[in-house]
Amino acid sequence: MDFKEGLIDYEAFGAKGDGVTDDMPAICEAHAYANAHGLSVRTKPDATYHLGGQALTAVIATDTDWNTSRFTVDDTQVEDHKAHLFEVRSLLEPEKLQIDRLTRDQRQVDARPERDCHVLVENAHKRQYIRRGLNQNDGVPQHDCFVLRRDGSVEADIDWEYDQITRVEARPIDDQTLYLRGGVFTTFANREHHPKGYNYWNRNIVISRSNTEVAGLTHYVVGETAVGCPYSGFISVQQCAHITLRNCFATGHKIYSTIGAAGKPVSMGTYDYNANNVVGFTMIGCRMNHITDRTRWGVIGSNFCKDILLEDCHLSRMDTHMGVSGTYVIRRCTLGHMGLNAIGRGQLTLEDSTLYGSSLVSFRRDYGSTWEGSLKIRNCRWIPACGDICQPHMINVSNDGTHDFGYPCSMPEEVVIDGLFVDDSNTPENYQGMYFFTSPDDFHDGVEQAFASEERPFPYTPCQQVKLRGLTTASGLRPRLSPNATMNAHTAVVEED
């Protein structure tokens, strides 16, 4: 075949682009040819490609420009709901590495890969993130991800001590950035009734190639009914490094209910974005509509990531379920009703942003409300509970010291506030001012109640210091530390000029 300017399109392989014909077989063939010959793909701007229910996955390993092409994803009847639509992956073969032990924050190892690699290590003999509550579980094997350079140097923080390593996966990092541009996708949502447990659907774009940027991709969801199963992320980034989502548009999904691990009803929802085991995850200018609509689930969830940056984003939430380490930065963003959620360690920075969550920052109680490091808040605005009547608690923590999460738990050692306006103009009668923290001893999830005993086999370390400068409230009332007397005795509040 002779393709002009080194570009191919789907029509050359039989795609109709009429919105009716299943174009997935032709799309798979086009990308396979492009990958084999090092060619880029550019679609017809006025085409509508129908992605039918066949269990087909197009592998993308070269630059792809979907510009203004439309894609319809019909999930009302599919062969395999776990099948991905597209996989963005490297053509480089995995490397074999020997790493026997690691120590926390280690910066050099003896292994010398042929190329820089994204590395995942695991100790199957130790469990961590042992979840508490209605979705309780036995945790996951201890593991870390990091970038290993050719000279043996390590990029990203090693979070744990490894006296043994039972698994090592090393995926080479391509030197050049792969660009995935444009595309307007519309998913006709599944209507599967699954009353007990979770049955996540894929039917998505999964990215496992390091050095990838997705720019200008739009995703709509239509056809949601009274029943349906959740999705694991229309853009799902897994086990790679240096990923950027730029100027993308996402859709919030309807919230459904199921029976959780504790045998009681729990809410379940879909993430339009998902990131797991990613080093260097960046979102710039990403947006969605209706960020304060509580009938829609939070738009993004992540696990085990290192160094997260959000800039100029407008989203219903940002969440790090099973941890982030290094830097976690929210800059010039607006976050909606599900707010900013975190556990992990390092430097959590929130600046020049507006948030509408019930708390300004919520440290997830199901994973111990732990943050090892500091929290810095600069020039921000907080509208508690989207402006509904509430008693504002700026930082949400909950850990009564009775549950083993697989790691020690603590509040941020230091909270620094340098410019924060709290709109506490809609509050209950007899309101006496906001609290900086909730009471850590309060744990109400339908399984267990607040803990009153003095026995705490897994103690929760309180915050040491709160530094204040430029904090103002709509009510004019002075903030208070916490309704918890023990915490008040351990935490100092320092006001600076």
Image (cartoon, rainbow, N blue to C red):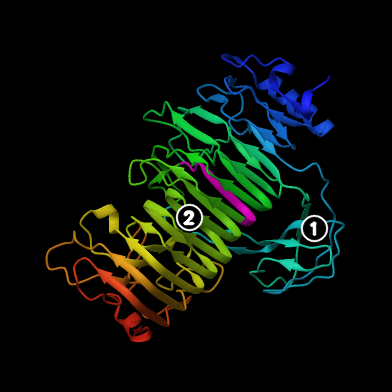
Q: Amino acid at mark 2?
A: Asp
Residue 301 picture location, percent across and down: 51, 50
Taking 146 as reference, is 246 above or below it? above
Residue 312 picture location, percent across and down: 47, 53
Q: Quadrant of residue 5?
A: top right
Near mark 2 (Cα within 10 A), the count class, few <14, some 14-19 or many ≥20, is many
Left or right relative to 85: residue 340: left
Residue at left offset 42%, top offset 58%: 340
Near mark 1 (Cα within 10 A), the count class, few <14, some 14-19 or many ≥20, is many
Magenta-colored span: 270-280
Per the picture, the main secondary structure of the magenta-coloured stretch is strand
Q: Quadrant of residue 46?
A: top right
Q: Nearer the viewer, residue 366 or 134?
A: 366
Considering the numbered disc 2 on the image, is that residue within a helix, a strand or a loop?
Answer: strand
Query: What quarter of the picture does the N terminus occupy?
Result: top right
- Marker count (numbered): 2
Was residue 274 drawn as part of the magenta stretch in this picture? yes
The residue positioned farthest toward the front in the image shown: 5
Residue at left offset 45%, top offset 67%: 369
Residue 14 picture location, percent across and down: 71, 14
Q: Nearer the viewer, mark 2 or mark 1?
A: 1
Q: Earlier in the sequence, mark 2 or mark 1?
A: 1
Residue receiving disc 1 = 116
- Determine which of the numbered discs, if any, sits on residue 319 in the image: 2
Was residue 203 drawn as part of the magenta stretch in this picture? no
Residue at left offset 55%, top offset 35%: 201
Residue 74 picture location, percent across and down: 53, 23
